[in-house]
Structures are given as C-alpha cells and as structure tokens.
Image (cartoon, grey):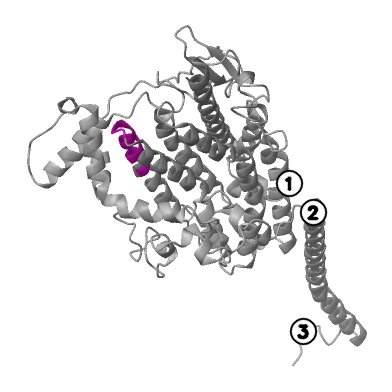
Amino acid sequence: MSLPGESDRPASARTEGGLSELVHSWRYFFWLLGLVLIVGLFFAEENWRGQWAWNSYKRAMAARGEPLELSAFVPPKVPDDKNFAMTPLLAPLFEFLPGMSPGVSPLSGIGLFASNYDVASRELNVSKAVRSNSWVKAQTDLPAWYAAFLNSTNKLAKQKVGLAATNFTVHEAALGVLAMLSEADPVFEELQAASNLPFSRFNLHYEGENPAAILLPHLSVMKRLTQVLALRACASLAARQTNQAFEDTKLLLCLTEVCKDEPFLISQLVRIAQLNIAMQPIAEGISLWSEPQLRSLQARLARVDFCADTQRAVGAERYWSSAIIEYVRRSPGKLDMLAGMTGTQQSGFDLAAVLMCLAPSGWFDFEQLNCSRMTDECLLPMFDVTARRISPHLSQKSEQCMAKLANRSLSSLYFQHLYFARLLLPATSRTAQKAAFAQTAVDCALLACALERYRREHGQFPESLTALQPQFIQKLPHDIINGEPLKYHRSESGQYVLYSVGWNEVDDGGAVGVAKSGEENSIAQGDWVWR
C-alpha cells in the first residue's frame, strides 16, 4: 500500500530523489576518505622528513669523526686477567638476579668491608675545621675520628662511656684509627695488587634494551673505598708510616681513574668527588714524601684531564638521549613511560604525553635531532679540549638555555620537537664548574709537588713558577678558566699562595670565596687557592 500522494508522483521524480539522497550520503564517505588520505599523506611526509633530517645529521657527524653509534662511546672489552674491575672483590658487583636490589651484590665480599668506618662516620661530630686551601682541611681530625670509633663500639656493647677527642694525642689517635680500619686491610691489599693491571672496564650492561635502565652499582662502592682509604692514608702519615701512606695515596689516584672512560656524566661526577677526597692526604703528605715519591705523584697527576673526560661524557649524552627516544618510540607502553618520565603518572591526564603517542614516527626523529643539536650548541661549547679550558661564560649561557626549556610547558615544546630535550638533557653548568674546580686541584697539587722539590734543593720556594722549569716540571699547567698562568707569589712567612681566578673570572688576590651562609670556600665566588 502506498502513502497518500506517493502514487501521484512521477516515477522519474522518485528516481531522482533517491539518487540525490544516495549521493548526499556518499558525500560524507568521500569527505572521510579525503580526511584519511590527507592525514596519511601528512604522516608519510613527516615520517620521511624526520628520517631524512636525522640521517643527514648523523652522516654529517660521522664525516666529522663523531659517530652516534654505541661503539663510539662504550670502552672496548679487555681481557679479564688484565682488568682491574674483574678482581674477585669487584667482579661480582653486577651479578645480581632480577628483582634483587641494585646495590652491592651479596656475591661480592666488599659489602661490609669497613663496618667500623660506617658506624664511626655516623657518630663523628667534627667542629668546623680550618681550611688550608680551597680543597682540603688544615689537618684531618684523627682524635675526633678515634673517639668516634671508640664511642660507636661502646654503643654497640651498650656501654655509656663517652670519650672526647681531647683524650688522645694525634699519634695515639692515628695508631688507633689504623687499628680500627685494619678490617679493610685484605680489601686494599687485593686492590693494590690489581692497580698494576693495565685496564679497567666494569661489566656494565650497555647492550640492554632500555638504556635508561643501565645500573651503576660500582660508583657508590668506588666512592666509599676512596673515603676509607683517604682516612687510612692520613692516619698513616700522622703515624709516620710514610711509605704505607704513599701506597694508599697512589691507590686513591688509581680509584679516581678506574671509571674515567665511562660515557656517563654521573661517572665523572663521582670521579670528581673522589679526587676532592684524595686531595687531603696528598696535601698532608707534601712535606713528608721523598723525592722519588713526589716525582711519582707529579707523573700521576699530570695524566688527569677532567676537561677532556667530562666533555666526552657530555658528548655521549647525544647518544643516550637518542637511544632513550628510540626506545620510547618502539615501546608499546609509550603513554605509561612518558607519564613516568614527566612525573604525571599519579597526577592524572597528560596532554603532551598523549599527543606524543599520537605523533608521526618522524617526529621522534626530530626529537632526536634537536636533542643532539642542543648538546652541540648549548652544552659542548663549555669545554675547549684543545686549549684545555672550561668557560664560566659559556656555562652561564648553557644554564640560561636549559632554563628556557624548563620554564615552558611540555605541550608547547611538543610542537617544536623539544619535548624530550626538556626531559632528558642534563643541566651541565654545575658539572662544568665542578670539573674545572677538580682540574685546578690536580694542577695545584702537581705544582705543589714541584715547589716542594725546589724548596728542598734551594732552601726556599722560588720567586716565580717559571723557575721550576725544566728541572722540576716540563710544562707549567695554565689556569683552566682563562688560559693564563696560575697566580703565584711567595708570602712574607716564606710560604706561598698559588691560585686560579676561579669561576667568577676575577683575580681576588688569593681570597677564598665565602658563601651566603657564611661558609668559606664557595666555589662560585672568590679564587681557588692552594697554600
């Protein structure tokens, strides 16, 4: 049965109306198809453009001798029998099972090697010590250390007897500290023997799928070994066991170098901390070391180059940022990973992370490219390896560059392909400052050895550093800040003041900087002084 009036319409009219409705409905399909085609073309074009730009950059880097492959940064494998890091104590550090804490492996015998030291260091209460220079105290407070050892032992024995540092002479305290540290003797004997091996490469899992998950449990061990050994060296000096102190000091410098080839900034920062600790026994022993020992220390110190080592680690950030971005791109759980990186995992919706998951694959190439370019333009210029200088001015510019990223939202950085640069690139200005400070310590200690040798032969320190050449030193190190000679003058007492102009690049006449808190030795202010 037809509707009223329908039969009155001509057949041709009814056919035209049906065709019109059909065409009208298909129009939406074509719009959708066109939209899909446009999006597909956009993704294809962005994928091609991103891949082309990133590959062009990598080819240009390789042509300059700076490839971005893992092999360019990872130290080569070495035979176990020639590897310091493969001693029975250190080799098991990386032999922990999945789910095991990434601390010291229970398979290693180094975990509790200095339990007395650990307890005493928590008990120690040393008053603010007078500094003899920017890096070291006038003298290690051995009576305070010995009192801390004894008091911690009494606490464990539930005795309430408290001993004060004034109860002991320095010599008595030195012998007591050495006795307390004797539990660590087997560890240091093994490391002393291993220090003669030609190589050091820890068994880091560089080839892991997720580069951000590489564990570095050896770094805390190296620093702890350095702390204990430095105290033992200072105690040996005070006990007039100079040869033992010298062997410990040589081992200290060895421990400072065992991680120098690792392509991580944190490895270099730990090395810098180790070096600053090692300065104490070096300074305390200057007047006690024999002529051959002073020459040996000079030779070891001359090999240290924190400028080149830190610059190489900063350059490796190009690879690590790229590798992490690539891992995120290929991960099926991008959103969770990005939320974890931005800290929004528990706080709710993260628009930038969602957009990154929806982005063309080529945008990840642009992210890798911009991370690498920012490393080239903002981070690496701080270090001039050829001239062996670290620039505070360029470090400040780097800090400003990174601050601009930090002050912008991730959503705005997303469209400029700087999303990962904000998340991954380190703020290296403080690292550059610390590297310059540590290298100045090395250079001053080297000169202090040469100056002491000059004094012994001539009965007094020289009028200028040039008098040291060539008998006592072949080449004078320059100020790593400005490239000029380090400042030096003899004092009225017959001693000397040796210093760098420091991070403020101003000659303050050998005055050590004072922090806002009133604490002496602000690295950012004043001169860096050895006296």
Which residue does the image show at 62% across and 61% down from the upper left? 76
- Quarter-of-image position of residue 406: top right
As helix, strand or loop, the secondary structure at mark 3 comes to loop
- Percent across and percent down for residue 386 are 72, 37
Quick one: 428 or 111, which is closer to the camera?
111
Q: Residue at x 42, y 67 (%)?
A: 95
The residue that label 3 is drawn on is 4
Image side of residue 426 versus residue 114, left or right:
right
Please say whether residue 207 is visible from this viewpoint.
Answer: yes
Assign the magenta stretch its main secondary structure: helix
Quadrant where the N terminus lies? Answer: bottom right
Side (left or right) of 400 relative to 119: right
**Mark 1 sits on what residue?**
373
Which residue is depicted at the point 43% across and 49% down? 222
Q: Determine crowd level at label 3: few under 14, some 14-19, many 20+ residues with C-alpha closer than 10 A.
A: few
Is residue 483 shown in magenta? Answer: no
Q: CA distance from mark 2 to mark 1?
A: 9 Å
Magenta residues, as a range?
Answer: 229-240
Q: Is residue 248 left or right of residue 344?
A: left
